[in-house]
C-alpha cells in the first residue's frame, strides 16, 4: 500500500497520537520478531489502520511500554505490545510486499527487474510463513495481482475497472480483520472503497512518471491531461470516501474510535485533496 | 376502447402526436359544450375523456419503453431489479446488455447504474444515473440515486463528527470570532439592556 490512509495529527488528542505512534512502533517490532530485521524496511502507515481496525473490532486496546529501537536508540518510545491486529498487519504487509515485487518483476525492465527478482527470493521465504496463516488472503492477493496484469496488458481505460483488483485486495485484507460476530460485509465494503481510493491516488501521483516511461496508467489511457486526471481522481475518490463512511457507520468499534474517525473523516479527505500534487508524507502533514 | 377507436373518437389518424391529441380534444370539448347549450352531455364527455386518457397514457409508456417491446421490458426489468437486490450485479449487467436499444430507456439506465453501484463502481454508476435522469427528469427514484452520489462527490460523508466540508473544515454553527462576539453582545443588549442594568 502507499501511505495515503493516515490520521491528521493536528486534530488528534495527545493520547490518541501516542497510541497511534505506539501502534506504528509496535508493528515495526512485530515485523522484526516474526520476519527478521530486513522486513522492517517495508513498514508503512497504511497497515497500521488495519491493525487498529482489527483490534478495535475485537475490543483489544493494546498496551504500550517504553522501549528503545534502532531509529531512536537513546530515548525510550511507547511501543504497543503484541496484539492480534499487529500480528495480522505484519502478515498482511509481508504478503502485499511479496505480490508487489512479483508484479514489479513482470513490469519493470533492466536493473529494477533484477532488483525485484532478487528481493522476491528473500520475500518468498517470508511469504510462505504468512501464507500458511492466511491462505485465503494469499490466494486473493495472487488472483488479483494476475487480474491487474491482465487488464494492464489489454490497456483498460475505465477507472472503476482498473481500480478493481486493488480494491478487492484491500477488501480481502479487511476480511481477515473481522472477529466472529462482526458485520463482515460492512467491513469488507469499507475496505473495498479504501482500496479504490489508494489505487486512484497512486495513479494520479504517478501520472507524469508513467507518461515519461510509457508505463501503463489508467488515467493516461482514459485520455485525461494531468490536471483533468487530478480532478477526476478527486471526484471519484470523494464518492468512494462517502461510500466507505456508509459502511464504517455500521461497524461496532470498541476502541481507538477517535483515531479511526480522524483517519477516515480528516486524513483520507486530506490525502484526496492532494491528489496529483506533491504531497507531504506522514501524519504530521498540514493543510496546504 | 382500443387505440384505433380512441383515435377515431378524436377524429385523428393512427399515430398522431401529443400536440395533435391535445388540440383535437380541446376542440371537441368546446364543440360538445356548444351543442349542449353550455353544458356538454355526460356521455359525450366520458367518451372524449376515455379516448384522451388512453392515448396520452400510451404515449407516456411508449416514451419510456422502446415502442413495441414495452410490456416485455417491464417484466424483464422487474426480474433484473430482483437480481441486483439479491447481489447478482454481474449477471444483471449481462442481461441488461442484451436488451436492444436499452440506452434510450430511462429505467434501463437506472438499472445499469444500480448494478454498477452495487459492485462499487461508483463512477460508472453516476454516468448511468445521470442518463436515467436526463431521459426521465420527473422520476424521484432516479434523481435520489443521482443526488446521493453527487453529494458524496462534493465531500459529504455519513456520520462525520468533524462537520467536514472542503479539506475537512466546514462552517460551524457557533463561532467565536471577534465580530460574532460583538454581534451577540449587541443582540443581548437590545433584549434586556444588560450594559446599563435592568
Image: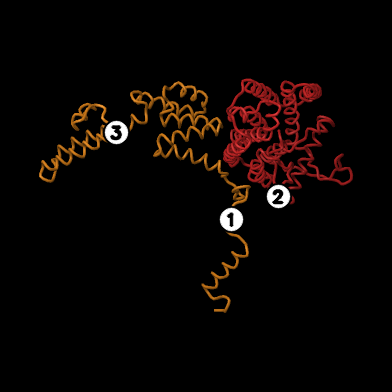
Chain colours: A red, B orange
* Label 1: chain letter: B
Q: Residue at x 46, y 40 (%)?
A: B144
* Label 3: chain letter: B
Question: Which is in the foreground here, disc 3 or disc 2?
Answer: 3
- Give the Cα distance between marks 3 and 2: 60 Å
Q: Which sits in the foreground, A116 or A45?
A: A116
Q: Is residue A213 above or below residue B31?
A: above
- Give the Cα distance between marks 1 and 2: 19 Å
Q: Residue at x 49, y 22 (%)?
A: B94
- Number of the label disc, if any, that sits on residue B172: 1
- Number of the label disc, if any, that sits on residue A12: 2
> Are discs 3 and 2 both within one chain?
no
Q: Judging from the image, what secondary structure is the residue with disc 2 in? A: loop
As drawn, is B38 to the left or to the right of B21?
A: left
x, y percentage for residue A139?
Answer: 68, 22
Does any portion of residue A42 appear in the rendered image? yes
Q: Judging from the image, what secondary structure is the residue with disc 1 in? A: loop
x, y percentage for residue A241?
Answer: 60, 39
Q: Residue at x 74, y 47 (%)?
A: A17
> Are discs 1 and 2 both within one chain?
no
x, y percentage for residue B13?
Answer: 22, 27
- Number of the label disc, if any, that sits on residue B57: 3
Q: Judging from the image, what secondary structure is the residue with disc 3 in? A: helix
**Quadrant of the image for the N terminus of chain A?**
top right
Q: Residue furthest right?
A: A74
x, y percentage for residue B182?
Answer: 59, 68
Amino acid at each position: 500500500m502507499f501511505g495515503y490512509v493516515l490520521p491528521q495529527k493536528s486534530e488528534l488528542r495527545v493520547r490518541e497520537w501516542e497510541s497511534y505512534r505506539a501502534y506504528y512502533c509496535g508493528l515495526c517490532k512485530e515485523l522484526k520478531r516474526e520476519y527478521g530485521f530486513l522486513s522492517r524496511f517495508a513498514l508503512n502507515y497504511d497497515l497500521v489502520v488495519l491493525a487498529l481496525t482489527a483490534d478495535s473490532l475485537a475490543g483489544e486496546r493494546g498496551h504500550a511500554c517504553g522501549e528503545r529501537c534502532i531509529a531512536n536508540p537513546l530515548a525510550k518510545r511507547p511501543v504497543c505490545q503484541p496484539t492480534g491486529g499487529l500480528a495480522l498487519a505484519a502478515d498482511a504487509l509481508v504478503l502485499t510486499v511479496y505480490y508487489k515485487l512479483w508484479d514489479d518483476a513482470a513490469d519493470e525492465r533492466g536493473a529494477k527487474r533484477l532488483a525485484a527478482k532478487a528481493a522476491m527470493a528473500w520475500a518468498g521465504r517470508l511469504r510462505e510463513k504468512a501464507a500458511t496463516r492466511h491462505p485465503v488472503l494469499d490466494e486473493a492477493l495472487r488472483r488479483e495481482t494476475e487480474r491487474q496484469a491482465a487488464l494492464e496488458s489489454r490497456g483498460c481505460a475505465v477507472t472503476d475497472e482498473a481500480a478493481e483488483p486493488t480494491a478487492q485486495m484491500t477488501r480481502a485484507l479487511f476480511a481477515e480483520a473481522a472477529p466472529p460476530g462482526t458485520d463482515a460485509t460492512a467491513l469488507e465494503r469499507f475496505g473495498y472503497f479504501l482500496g479504490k481510493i489508494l489505487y486512484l491516488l497512486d495513479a494520479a501521483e504517478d501520472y507524469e512518471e508513467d507518461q515519461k516511461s510509457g508505463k501503463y496508467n489508467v488515467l493516461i489511457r482514459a485520455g485525461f491531461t494531468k490536471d483533468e486526471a487530478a480532478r477526476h481522481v478527486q471526484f471519484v475518490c470523494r464518492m468512494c470516501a462517502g461510500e466507505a463512511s456508509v459502511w464504517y457507520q455500521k461497524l461496532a468499534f470498541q476502541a481507538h474510535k477517535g483515531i479511526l474517525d480522524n483517519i477516515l473523516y480528516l486524513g483520507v479527505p486530506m490525502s484526496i485533496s492532494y491528489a496529483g500534487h506533491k504531497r507531504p508524507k506522514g501524519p504530521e502533514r498540514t493543510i496546504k | 376502447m382500443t387505440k384505433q377507436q380512441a383515435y377515431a373518437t378524436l377524429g385523428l389518424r393512427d399515430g398522431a402526436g401529443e400536440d395533435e391529441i391535445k388540440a383535437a380534444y380541446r376542440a371537441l370539448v368546446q364543440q360538445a359544450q356548444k351543442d349542449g347549450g353550455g353544458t356538454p352531455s355526460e356521455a359525450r364527455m366520458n367518451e372524449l375523456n376515455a379516448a384522451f386518457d388512453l392515448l396520452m397514457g400510451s404515449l407516456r409508456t411508449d416514451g419510456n419503453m422502446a415502442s413495441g417491446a414495452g410490456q416485455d421490458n417491464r417484466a424483464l426489468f422487474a426480474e433484473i431489479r430482483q437480481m441486483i437486490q439479491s447481489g447478482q450485479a454481474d449477471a444483471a449487467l449481462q442481461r441488461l446488455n442484451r436488451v436492444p436499444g436499452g440506452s434510450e430507456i430511462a429505467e434501463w439506465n437506472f438499472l445499469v447504474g444500480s448494478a454498477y453501484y452495487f459492485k462499487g463502481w461508483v463512477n460508472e454508476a453516476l454516468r448511468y444515473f445521470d442518463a436515467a435522469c436526463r431521459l426521465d427528469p420527473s422520476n424521484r427514484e432516479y434523481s435520489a440515486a443521482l443526488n446521493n452520489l453527487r453529494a458524496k462527490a462534493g465531500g459529504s460523508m455519513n456520520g462525520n463528527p468533524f462537520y467536514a466540508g472542503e479539506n475537512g473544515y466546514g462552517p460551524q454553527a457557533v463561532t467565536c470570532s471577534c465580530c460574532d462576539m460583538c454581534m451577540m453582545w449587541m443582540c443581548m443588549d437590545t433584549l434586556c439592556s444588560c450594559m446599563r442594568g435592568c
